Image (spheres, rainbow, N blue to C red):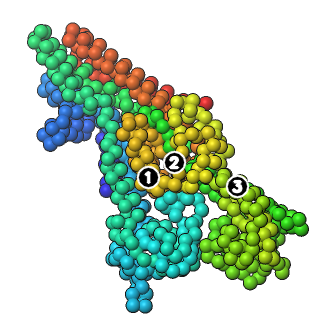
Amino acid sequence: MKKWIMEEDKLNLIFVIISGIALLVSLSHLLRGSLGFDSAWIAIVLCGIPILLGAIKGLVVDHDIKADVLVSIALVASVCIGEYFAAGEVAFIMAIGTLLENGTSRKANEGIERLIKLTPKTARVLKDGTEKIIPADQVNINDILLVLAGETIPVDGVIASGETSIDQSVMTGESLPIDKTVGDAVTSGTVNQYGTFTMRATKVGKDSSLQRMIQMVKEAEANKAPIITLADRWATWMVWAALGAAVITGAVTGELIRAVTVLVVFCPCAFILATPTAILAGIGNATTYGIIIRSGDALERFSKVKHIAFDKTGTLTHGKLNVMAVKSFNDCITEEKLLYYAASAEQRSEHPIGKSIVSYYQSICHTMCEPQEFSLLAGQGVRAFVDGQEVMAGKPDLLKTEGITIPEKIQKAATDYSEKGATIVYIGINKETAGFIVLSDTVREDAAAMISKLKELHMEPILLTGDNASAAQYISELVSISKVKSDLLPEDKMNELKRYNQKDEPVCMVGDGINDALALKSAYAGVAMGGIGSDIAVEAADAVLVSDDIQRIPYLIKISQKTMKKINVNIVFSMSLNFLAVLLSAMGILNPVLGALVHNVGSVAVVINSALLFVSKDR
């Protein structure tokens, strides 16, 4: 289907080129004798027939009057009195307008298909003590499933045995895997990081979390109605006004050619070009600054936005855990040595936290000891011998299980960091708490400046995140966002955005993860991070920041507003020109051919005015 649409666009472009050449030949009277007919007929057939068919379909099938009805009337009237060039020129200009509009708005939406691909096709079901692989859609409630390390969970359920860490970024955007044990809930589409566990299915088929998310994305896309162009919005009035003016002109002057000329000049050629040319220029300008805007409808929506909602992880922050501090509370162990013990012990760990510690240590040092007697305690941490010292790294529960107490001063110091959304890894050495390592997702360096620019544009920033309240509050304070909503699932974000839209306060959503796809579709307009963002988020958005440069978000709003202002100027000019041309036609000063040439003058002026958007700069 997509290939067919692309071929249709190419065919239409060929028709426009051929029609343009044919009109030039007709105007210069070249080859008329050789051809045996006026070459303007080529433009009438190639560009005019699709317009006529569209007008007939609109009237008969859709019971709707659009701009092409007026064009069809003028085209037929011109042909009837032998003014073939005028008819061909009007059809030609209309075809260019349609081609430009299609070129800026036709984008294949593959986001839903990508979401569907996330759905596991099979599930490991345990029945009568044996493992059986069945299609995921055949899993029943209360079935016991086996999930191996690295596998995607096929349905919603509760862990029956085993411990693990689950990557829930698909559903919540949470930057860290969540440790799970017996009795904890797990959802479809999330990934088992390591370890094997069994689970009891609680929601299957269309009721599972991932399938409900897919369905809501489809509904959000279906409910986002396209914006109707002004030419079509005023088409009914324009048709009756044109017919009325033509009839009055013919009745008063008694000259049919004047009436036809009125119909020709009344055709909104420059008016129709006013919108697509400005949109094409606005989208082209944005592209030079690393902003891809999907359509003219999207550009118009951005110009009306009053609030901008941000996801936290990967949008306002870098989306990666980094070691922020190392604190030693043992006088015999320096902070550098504490980090050495922790990194050496974590070498064999597959947990993202352990990998972050190892990566950080390797970036500042080169030597680590190979751990001995390494053991992974799922959901708690690791234990290993490093240089003959017993090292434990993990949660407080790990140390407490081994009978190691955590002094109050260490707990207090750790709390100061955790309240800012940081993750704390406690380090125990030889059965004593030696200190801890602080990891955190860091705020983008330009986030605060970007938020400040948005406020200057009278935009209200909002933070919507699946992360916990303390992390959300800490980040919001750093970037000066006062409105914060935390612990949100994709459906919760959607509902928050709907509240704004229902109050007629258009809101733009900025996100990067798969979990943001529903929010991006539900928002009045959506912006995705193209570099680190998931393919699904990119396909769901109305605009994409190719290099993840959030500093471009204010310019996206500004260029969309500039484009809409340019469209309004074009419309006022084209309408004024049409009104003047109607008066001159009624007075007999313009004939159909001259009237068609006036169209060219107006259309060229509109195109030049729109092209000025290309030189607009992000200051």
Foreground residue among 181 and 78: 181
Q: In front: mark 1 or mark 3?
A: 3
Disc 1 crowd, CA 10 A, few/some/many (<14, 14-19, 20+): some
Q: Residue at x 85, y 66 (%)?
A: 330
Give the mark, 1 or 3, whose residue is nearer the N terminus.
3
Q: Are marks 2 and 1 in contact (CB under 8 Å)?
A: yes
Disc 3 crowd, CA 10 A, few/some/many (<14, 14-19, 20+): some
Foreground residue among 510 and 606: 510
The amino acid beneath tag 1 is: Asp
Task: Farthest residue to the bottom: give it.
Answer: 129
Give the labeled residue for mark 1: 492
**Position in image of residue 141 (x %, y %):** 35, 75
The amino acid beneath tag 3 is: Tyr
Q: Residue at x 66, y 53 (%)?
A: 419
Distance from disc 2 to disc 1, alpha carbons, whole Å, reads: 10 Å
Give the labeled residue for mark 2: 485
Left or right side of 284 for 452: right
Residue 14 appears in the rendering: no
Foreground residue among 528 and 388: 388
The amino acid beneath tag 2 is: Lys
Q: Are marks 1 and 3 in contact (CB under 8 Å)?
A: no
Give the mark, 2 or 1, whose residue is nearer the N terminus.
2
**Position in image of residue 506 (x %, y %):** 42, 37
The N terminus appears in which quarter of the rendering? bottom left
Left or right side of 20 for 616: right
Quadrant in the picture for residue 270: top left
Return the mark for residue 417. 3
The C terminus appears in which quarter of the rendering? top right
Quadrant in the picture for residue 41: top left
Q: For mark 2, give the secondary structure.
A: strand
